[in-house]
Amino acid sequence: TAPKPEGSGEGLYGGVGQNPCCSVCKPAFSVFRFLTTKEKFHELLDSGVKCPNDDKASDNAVPKETTEDSLEEPQEKKFKVDPDEQERTRKRDSKRMRGQNKSRPHMKPTSYDNRRLCPSIIQERETKCVYGDKCKFIHDVAEYMALKPADVGEHCYLYDTFGKCHYGLSCRFARAHISADLKNLANEERVKAMEGRTPVRNSLDKDLQWRLRKKVVPFTASDAYMKTVFKGGHKAGEGWKKAATAENGKASAGSNLALVKTIGPLTDADVIKLRQCEKKQCGNLPFRRICKRFGADITCGEMAMCTNLLQGQSSEWALLKRHESEDLFGVQVEGCFPDTMTRCAELLNNKIDVDFVDINSGCPIDLVYKKGGGCGLMTRTNKFEQIIRGMNSVLDVPLTVKIRTGVQEKANIAHKLIPEMKKWGVSMITLHGRSREQRYTKSADWDYINTCSQLASPIPLFGNGDILSYYDAMKARETEVSGIMLARGALIKPWVFTEIKERRDWDISSSERLDVLRDFTHYGLEHWGSDTQGLEKTRNFLLEWLSFMCRYIPVGLLEQVPQRINERPPYYMGRDYLESLMASQHVGDWIKISEMLLGPVPKNFNFLPKHKANAYK
């Protein structure tokens, strides 16, 4: 059936057999029981009432007039408002609040903790601070403890998990592991059990960062390939095999080292079917751990710029980190020139542990597209070919590509590119069923994806677009795709992986969803730190995720299953207060949820969401 139009009031259901939200509620249900207006919805959330039906008794009661009521001042005189002026104001305000907040201001986590304790004291070093009196951090522990914000909780996740919290006195859960004499305690038994274990890999070491910044890292294989590209009269990479053979011949003559054999192209037997791809700001390592817990098979890091990686930028290298639970993990890179992309591939091949490298040639962002990267590569086939051939020549792991249907809405070009990419040596293709102009509007074209999957055979092709439920996944698998990739669907409901694998709808409760968010905060504190900086960074990423998660409609409230990814429901009351709070599109309510898990926000806290509808200051 076709999805109901926005604001029609249909699609939400409270049928017989649904559990009442609490013992006070009457068991009588009606089709429109959960529907409400915007004003009543926010009135409920602001009041903190635990049950939507609690107000009925108070509504029917007749208010008592008191002497104080009779002595109240009369209401101020209301001035007549010009209807035309009111309409013009309304249109102007609605126009202002529409669309996205581009170039959002970045609030650094350090701004919430200006007076920090010196790392030499936090880490309990035997030697004094090397900066002495010139150090910008606090050295007086008593002074720091007087300025430090109050602790958030009684238990420290890092201490309970690893036996020792390396953030010591600066930890916002310090009371769990700080003694009376302000010493950092350790659980020796737990510390010994964790010895030799590396939970996170692919970190950037200082020596490599220094060599990248000084441009002294050798790129032998990349330079050899680029010589064949720039040689006059040669097509992209034609001379690479001859050059590589000559180099390998010289190497084998001079030494007895055996040649490294590459893994070769992927086949359907090699590919696990559920791939969870990432979105910038939300597809971080803690979120991927949540997806792995719910059953994602393949995880892929956030898009990293190849030029930033070659410059040794710590923030960009952080996108390559891999958790030990990610048994099949790849990194996604973006670039628009064969020399930088080939060098980046060689660097990744030699320095980090990955199972595949993915080229993002489907990014629709203007900043990337105007430079010739992302979707721009689909129209620059010569450069695209040089990039793929070059990266293939230096990688020992499979090279995959993510593309869209095309750039313009009604001018698909993916079916022309796919046969060419097979010749260039791509191991797998992921196709998003929308063009760049469409971005994420309208429905994904799965008929076109099916056509392209037939053209790609025997190379596996994964389909992507509008997967939010088990039904969507099964419909997608009716095509000839080798697997499916989830992005927005995983952000809205990460338990979709469990639904797909168990072939069922999961009417997950609000308390279970809160537990998922709590686990995310634990993983975030482990990844970014349990001090004020790490805690506020975790909060920021939690709020970014809640901007997607609030779109989820509980299965028990739906008249028609499943929910469609582009549907926007009318205002509705949840089966309990927390479920209503999680359904709010207002960023102030997301702040309330974050405060349940991470304590109150700082006084100077502000968060500007991606969309202009709301902001918090």
Image: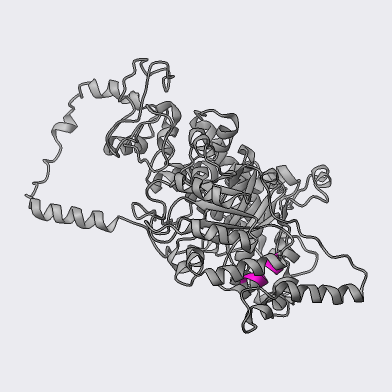
In the rendered view, tell whether residue 481 sits above or below residue 499: below
Of the 4 image quadrants, the one containing the N terminus is top left
Q: Quadrant of residue 581?
A: top left
The quadrant the C terminus occupies is: bottom left
Q: Is residue 83 above or below residue 390?
A: above
Of 283 and 149, which appears nearest the observer? Answer: 283
Nearest to the observer: residue 25 or residue 318: 318
Classify residue 47 as left or right of residue 505.
Answer: left
Specify whether residue 347 is painted magenta: yes
Residue 425 location, x and y as percent?
A: 65, 61
Which of the 4 image quadrants contains residue 503? top right
In this view, the residue in front, 383 or 46, is 383
Above or below: residue 257 compared with residue 434: below
Q: Residue furthest bottom?
A: 232
Residue for point 49% across, 48% down: 451
Provide residue 506's location: percent of width, then percent of height.
52, 29
Q: Does 86 appear in magenta?
A: no
Seen in the image, is 287 located left or right of residue 570? right
Q: In the rendering, at what x and y percent does residue 77 appear? A: 8, 46
- The structure residue drawn at horizontal position 56% and vertical position 34%, both measured from the top left corner, is 500
Secondary structure character of the magenta stretch overall: helix
Q: Which residues are magenta?
A: 341-348
> Which residue is farthest right?
256
Q: Position of residue 302 (x, y in %)?
A: 58, 57
- Count how many numbered circles sit on residues in the image: 0
**Is residue 357 among the parts visible in the rendering?**
yes
Task: Identify which residue is drawn at 35% across, 16% down.
Answer: 26
Q: Foreground residue, 226 or 160?
A: 226
Q: Is residue 563 above or below residue 284?
A: above
395 with respect to 172 (left or right)? right
